[in-house]
C-alpha cells in the first residue's frame, strides 16, 4: 500500500514538474546573472521540491504547483546568492524580490497566452493551420516543408510571417490588456 502511494506521488510529481520545468528555469534565470547559477539552483530546487512534495496540497490546480515551486526556487536563489556573496556581479535582495515578482507574474500570464494561441491557431484557414503545424509541431526544416507545399523557402518564410502577424493580432484581441 505504501509503495503504491509512493508510486502515485512520484508520478504526480513528475507530471507537474515536467509541465512547469521550463517556467521554473525561466524564473530562476531571471534572478541570476549566470547559466551556471541557474543550473545549480535548478538542481537544488528539484531536490527540495521532491523532498517536500508530500507537504504540497495536490487538491488545488496545477498553477498552485507552479507558485509553490517558484517560492521554493526563490529561496534556493537566495541561498545560492549567500554562498556566492564574494562574486562581483550581485543583485541586492530588493532587486531579486522585484525580479522574482515580475517573473512569477509573467509565468502566470503564459498559460493564458498559450490557450489564446491554441484557439487562434484553430481559427486559421485549414491550409494555413496545416502549414503552421508542419513547420512548428513537426519541427521540419523550412526547405523540406517548402518542397512539400510547392513553394520556395523564401515564399514560405513570407507566408509564415503573415500567419504569425495574424496570430499575434488574434492573441492580442483575445487577451486585451495582457501583453503578448
Image (tube, rainbow, N blue to C red):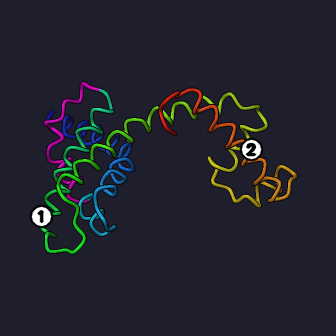
- Residue 154, horizontal then vertical, whole percent: 81, 59
Q: State the image quarter where residue 16 is shown.
A: top left
Vertical order, 62 against 134 (above or below): above
With 174 as the anchor, is 68 left or right in this view?
A: left
The answer to which quarter of the image holds residue 128 is top right
Decide which of 131, 75 is in the foreground and name it: 75
State the image coordinates of residue 36 (x, y, percent, origin top left): 30, 69
The secondary structure that dominates the magenta segment is helix
Q: Earlier in the sequence, mark 2 or mark 1?
A: 1
Q: Is residue 138 magenta?
A: no
Q: Which mark is residue 157?
A: none
Q: Bin the neighbour count of mark 1 within 10 Å (Cα to Cα): few under 14, some 14-19, many 20 and up.
A: few
In the depicted structure, whether residue 66 falls above or below residue 43: above
Which residue is under mark 1?
Answer: 82
- Rendered view: 45 above or below 88: above
> In what quadrant of the picture does the N terminus appear?
top left
Residue 95 on image: x %, y %? 24, 54
Is 57 part of what is drawn in magenta?
A: yes
Label 2 environment density (alpha carbons within 10 Å; few <14, some 14–19, many ≥20):
few
Please tell me which residue is depicted at 34% across the width and 39% down the height of the picture.
Answer: 105
Q: Tell me the magenta residue range.
A: 43-60
* Residue shown at 83% from the left, 49% from the top: 149
In the figure, residue 11 lies in which quadrant? top left
Q: Which residue is the site of mark 2?
A: 162
Give the residue displayed 19% in from the left and 47% down from the top.
72
Give 35 or 14, whichever is nearer the viewer: 35
Q: Nearer the viewer, residue 152 or 104?
A: 104
Amino acid at each position: 500500500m505504501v509503495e503504491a502511494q509512493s508510486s502515485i506521488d512520484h508520478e504526480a510529481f513528475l507530471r507537474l514538474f515536467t509541465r512547469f520545468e521550463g517556467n521554473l528555469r525561466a524564473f530562476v534565470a531571471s534572478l541570476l546573472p549566470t547559466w551556471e547559477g541557474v543550473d545549480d539552483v535548478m538542481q537544488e530546487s528539484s531536490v527540495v521540491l521532491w523532498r517536500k512534495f508530500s507537504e504540497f496540497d495536490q487538491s488545488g490546480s496545477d498553477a498552485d504547483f507552479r507558485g509553490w515551486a517558484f517560492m521554493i526556487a526563490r529561496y534556493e536563489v537566495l541561498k545560492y546568492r549567500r554562498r556566492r556573496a564574494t562574486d562581483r556581479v550581485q543583485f541586492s535582495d530588493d532587486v531579486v524580490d522585484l525580479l522574482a515578482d515580475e517573473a512569477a507574474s509573467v509565468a502566470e500570464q503564459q498559460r493564458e497566452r498559450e490557450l489564446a494561441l491554441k484557439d487562434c491557431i484553430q481559427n486559421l484557414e485549414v491550409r494555413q493551420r496545416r502549414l503552421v503545424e508542419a513547420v512548428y509541431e513537426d519541427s521540419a526544416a523550412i526547405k523540406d516543408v517548402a518542397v512539400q507545399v510547392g513553394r520556395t523557402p523564401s515564399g514560405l518564410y513570407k507566408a509564415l510571417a503573415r500567419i504569425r502577424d495574424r496570430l499575434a493580432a488574434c492573441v492580442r484581441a483575445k487577451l486585451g490588456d495582457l501583453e503578448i
